[in-house]
Amino acid sequence: MSAQDLLVVRGLVAGYGAAPVLQAIDLTVPAGTIAAVVGANGAGKTTLLRALSGMIRPAAGQVLLAGEDLRGTPVEKLVRRGMAHVPEGRGVINELTVDENLRLGGLWRRDRADAGRALTEVYELFEPLARRRRHLGHQLSGGERQMLALGRALVARPRLLLLDEPSLGLAPRVVARTMALLRQLRDRTGLTVLLVEQNVRSALAVADQGVVMALGRVVIAAPADKLRDDVELRHAYLGF
Amino acid sequence: MSATRAAVPPKQRPADAGDRPVDRRRGSTLLRHLAIMLAAGLLLVGVSYAVEPFRNFQLATVAAYLCATAGLTVLTGLNGQLSLGHGALMATGAYTVAFCQNAFADRGMTGGWLLPLSLGAAVLGTVAVGAVVGVAAARLRGPYLAGVTLAVAVVVPALAVTFDGVFNGEQGLSVPVEPPPVSLGPYFPYERWQLWLTGAATLLALLLLANLIRSRYGRTFRAVRDDEVAARLAGIHVARTQVLAFVVSAATAGLGGALLAVLAQSVSPGAFSLTLSLFLLMAVVIGGLGRLTGALWGAVLLVALPDLTHSLTEMLTLSPAVAQRMEGNLPLAIFGITLIVVMIAAPGGVQGLLSRLGRALLARWSARRS
Amino acid sequence: MDRFVFLTIDGLSRGAVYAAFALALVLIWRAARVVNFAQGAMAVAAAYVAYTVSAQTGSYWLGFVVAIVAGLLLGALVDRAVMRYVDHTSPLNPVIVALGLVLLIQAVLGMVYGSEFRPAEAPFSRSALTVGGLAVLSPYDLFVFATIGVVVVGLAWIFARTAVGLRMRAAAFAPEVSRLLGVNVGGMLTLGWALASGVGALAAMLVIPTELGLHPHAMDLVFVSAFTAAVVGGLDSPPGAVVGGLVVGLLLSYVSGYAGSDLTPLAVLVLLLAVLLVRPGGLFAPVAARRV
């Protein structure tokens, strides 16, 4: 393990009930890179993210964030370790306003001044949110909800961002903008992203590393451009 | 009703005759229940000769409570409606029987058929009240229903005081009951006669309930409990089913209350307080929700526990004042703790534990044989 | 006319207490989706603690403070020691467990204190002051209004303006997402129970001197009235609970004033049924979201 590897997963086994969904996952994400996990429905992509953020307890294996073992860390403490998880369906809290949703992302921080700065930055980053500050979560459009979920994660100033299907149900233009934003964040702030996607093309277009999962295993992890451009690899693992 | 038809496993449906096998199966259920009830009745008669009069009276009380708990377990366990108002329904039955018996006595009427008539009137009266509450209940869910029935349980006993011209206030009414028939002999103990009466009425009610549970209606009860939306999509009229369950449950509660009034030969609002409603609920939960045998354990518990704590407080040497406080409240405290522990640790109740134990023993036995 | 004014003031004063008690129910309902049927018994337990403290020290106010603290602690205890372990998949389970708590608490109180009524003193005179020949407010009514006002405004401030309030609301609406955002959801739940139980204890302290006195069952009917108030307002709405409380208080006051106090329980039942049958979500409910 090199010093630059922010997230290291070794032999992770997890699932719901008796039969594990994830079977010995190994994965390494270097700091300041974007990794895209792709694969068919039911491959275990969402389960992988849930196991990483502690929402389900792994049966075996190790998750290291910047060299620290995360085992036994409660979910609510992970954000303090620098991991932010934007769940599938994005988890905007409908009954709270945009502003409250965003503030919630930074409430745990001791450095109130910086939390305030982070909030301002997010409003600058996502103009439409600033205009809808007082609106309730359920009044937002799909794209705005996406911004809100992403912005709320960024208020915490995470080192590692776990994103579950950010393209789900969004227009191609919005997807492209989101992907571009991730790249921009990586270049500017050194953010590390682990992205789970069904939309293989746009995910691989933005990622540094591509990870293909099938039936609870990692079948190949390769540089994203190689996976994208090598016809044989693409045929073998992605089916197009 | 294609959904219910499909629920019958194919192996029990021979290919040669269309609907008849299903009917025959239902008939055999009825016969089986009849046989069980007959056996229970014979056992009860035997026991009534074997034990002393006081025990006979206690068993009769168990039978009366069993009526109410059985109805409640059908409502709460099988249909998923929580009623905290069954004490009030029992009061309805009890007061109806008191009115009828008094009316008969005032007119100087006598005869063995009068008491069954009064009991029938009590059931009908409670059905009417139950239908009203049930129609309201069918529109309500979980905590709302619990709140309304709680209000019923608190308010109904208070009515007896409000309209004390009719109900004679806190004092209540007396229930004149005739002595056992002369044909049974001059020295036939009254308590044995009470046990026979209540036992017969309760067994009849249980027989009807057991068959109802096994019928199409029982299945719709459960379907509505488990998933209202799915039940509706399967063609079940949810509201009607809920009202039906409430009415059935009210009828048995009314019978139970009427039997209690006959046993005590009096009826007063104090006997049907909110605590009684809570007791009934607790009894069915501790016994095992949704099972008639669980209702039996619950009814036994309702009679046995106060008795046990009474002997317990007598064993300890306490000052009279302390003993009096303990005696009234210790059973309540034990009930409360048991209820909480059962809900958390063993949601199946006593009957759930027993059947688990039975299965484990059976498994061990068959393992040893092979 | 005099009588009407008197009954109105009396109804509002009673209604303020119902409002606080209904508010306590709504707090737990919003936080945990549980209607706490043990609320009345828990509040009475806190009032008994206050009674003991006041009897020992001779100070009403010390007892008053102790009651609220006891309420807070009891609420936290009930959550941590009991409710946390209850399977919440069926809404029946927490209700049944709460009823078990009712039996247990009332029995323990009966064993310790006996079941006779104990006189509860009021800190201020309950005889009405007259303004221009018209009997209006008693000092005690003023005290009730002021206290409930402080509680309502305080709770509103906590939930709308403070970080803890935001966390509590988030934890109630979306527990899983809140955990991902670093909110200690279990802690917020305990806090919700404690707050609600503290408010309930306060309401009990205010209402018991106006009724027959301290008794293990002293809050049974108050609970039913407060539940009705909460339902009138819609179980999910704190402002609704306050309005519902005042409505129920006024109704009970008019009924007992014009038709006889024996009829008040029946009036509560009729109001509860009427509201539930006509508008099951309460008067303040948004348009029904779930329809098949």
Image (cartoon, rainbow, N blue to C red):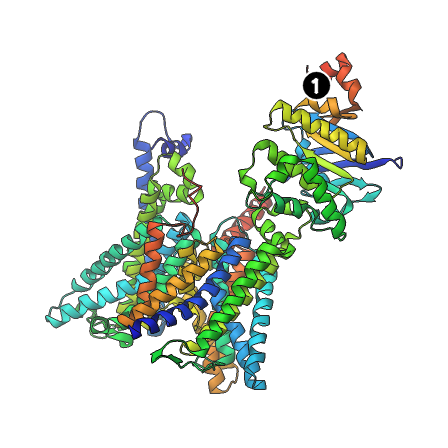
Look at the image and tell me whether residue B357 can be seen.
Answer: yes
Q: Which residue: 57% across, 46% down?
A: A96
The quarter of the picture where the N terminus of chain A appears is top right
Q: Which residue: 42% across, 78% down?
A: C138
Indicate left or right for A122 with B333 as reference.
Answer: right
- In this rendering, the answer to whether B214 lies above or below C265 is above
- Three-letter code, disc 1: Leu
> Image quarter for residue B175?
bottom left
Residue placed farthest to the right in the image? A2
- In this rendering, the answer to whether A70 lies above or below B235 is below
Give the total number of marks visible in the rendering. 1
Graded by Cα atoms within 10 Å as few (under 14), some (14 to 19) or many (20 or more), the crowding at tag 1 reads some
Look at the image and tell me whether residue B293 can be seen.
Answer: no
The quarter of the picture where the C terminus of chain A appears is top right
Please tell me which residue lies in front, C18 or B305.
C18
Mark 1: secondary structure: helix
- In this rendering, the answer to whether B203 lies above or below C131 is above
Q: Return the x and y of residue B176 as percentages of the image width and height.
A: 20, 72
The residue indicated by pointer 1 is A238
Q: Return the x and y of residue A188 as percentages of the image width and height.
A: 80, 33
Q: Which residue: 74% across, 51% down?
A: A109
> Image quarter for residue B169?
bottom left
Please tell me which residue lies in front, B55 or B252.
B252
